[in-house]
Structure formats: C-alpha cells, structure tokens
Image (cartoon, rainbow, N blue to C red):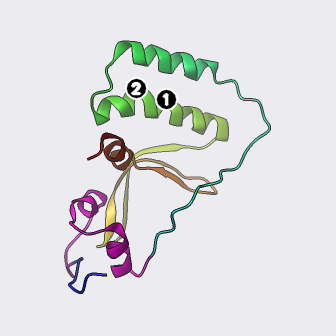
Amino acid sequence: MSSRRILQVGESYNFSRYFELPFTIDNILAELNCTIERKNLTLPESSEILDIQFLQQQLRRNFSHVDLVNETTRREALISPILFEVCDLTNQRLNIEYSIAVNDYLKGTLDYYIAAPQNLSVLVKIIAGIISGS
C-alpha cells in the first residue's frame, strides 16, 4: 500500500471521484479499512417460468430506433426497461437518481436503486465506464 495519504481529511468524495484517483482500488479500500473480494456471484434462482416476451419486444424496438452511443441512451433504451421489469416481477419500487450520504468519503447519487430485503443498486456510470474502457 502507498505510504502517503490517498483520501484527504475534510475533502468530500463521490463515486466518480474515486475513479479519477491515480491509485488502485485495493489501496483506496485499504485506507478505508476495507477489502474487496473478487469472485463469481451466485444469484438466487427461481423455478418460476417468466414471460419476458414483452420485454424482449420492447428492447428490440428500442434497438431499432436508437444508437447506443452514450450513457443516457443506454440508460433510457436498455437499462430502464429491464429494471422496470425486475421491479414488476419482484413487486419492488425503483428509485432513480437516488442520493446517498454515508460520510464525507462515501456520498453521491446512484442511477438506480431497488430497496428490497437484499438491496440492489445499479451503478450505470461505473458499468458504462467498464464497458467503454474508460
């Protein structure tokens, strides 16, 4: 780990700012007394047969009308319809542009957040950055 301080006392950090820092995620997390575990995620499965034909048609239609050239387009055309379907199937509410403030080192806005017994947040900006390589 780096011997110099990564996070400055009195500074405020949001999600985007962490990705601008010239340090590894392991070093940043170590400064927060956290670690990251990289492993495959096993999600619960259901034996229920889901009818997703409407969602498939909606996504095909969206693909035929827009080019997925930026984050807003991807969110509106792809991610939102899928999350609305998830909420419909699980009977949960979808929070859009959900603000959180844990402390000065963790605050910002989640693009989507589904408050459920097992909370689900979707960080579209991060996912889009990973996909585009930025």
Figure check: 70 above or below 96: above
Q: What element carries label 1?
A: helix
Q: Which residue is drawn at 40% across and 12% down?
A: 64
In x, y percent, where is residue 17?
A: 23, 61
Please give the label number shown on residue 4: none
Q: In terms of image quadrants, where is residue 23?
A: bottom left
Is 3 placed left or right of 35 in the picture? left
Do the numbered discs 1 and 2 sit on residues whose CB atoms are within 8 Å? yes
Q: Is 22 contained in the magenta span?
A: yes
Q: Name the residue under label 2.
A: 77
Q: What residue type is labelled 1?
A: Pro
Q: Which residue is drawn at 47% across and 69% down?
A: 36
Query: How far separated are the C-alphas under marks 1 and 2?
Result: 7 Å
Q: Residue at x 60, y 44 (%)?
A: 92
In x, y percent, where is residue 72?
A: 30, 33
Q: What residue type is labelled 2?
A: Ala
Is 23 placed left or right of 75 in the picture? left
Q: Residue at x 71, y 29 (%)?
A: 50
Q: Residues within 10 Å of mark 1 (few under 14, many from 20)?
A: some
**What residue range appears in magenta?**
8-34
Q: Is 14 contained in the magenta span?
A: yes
Q: Mark 1 points at which residue?
A: 81
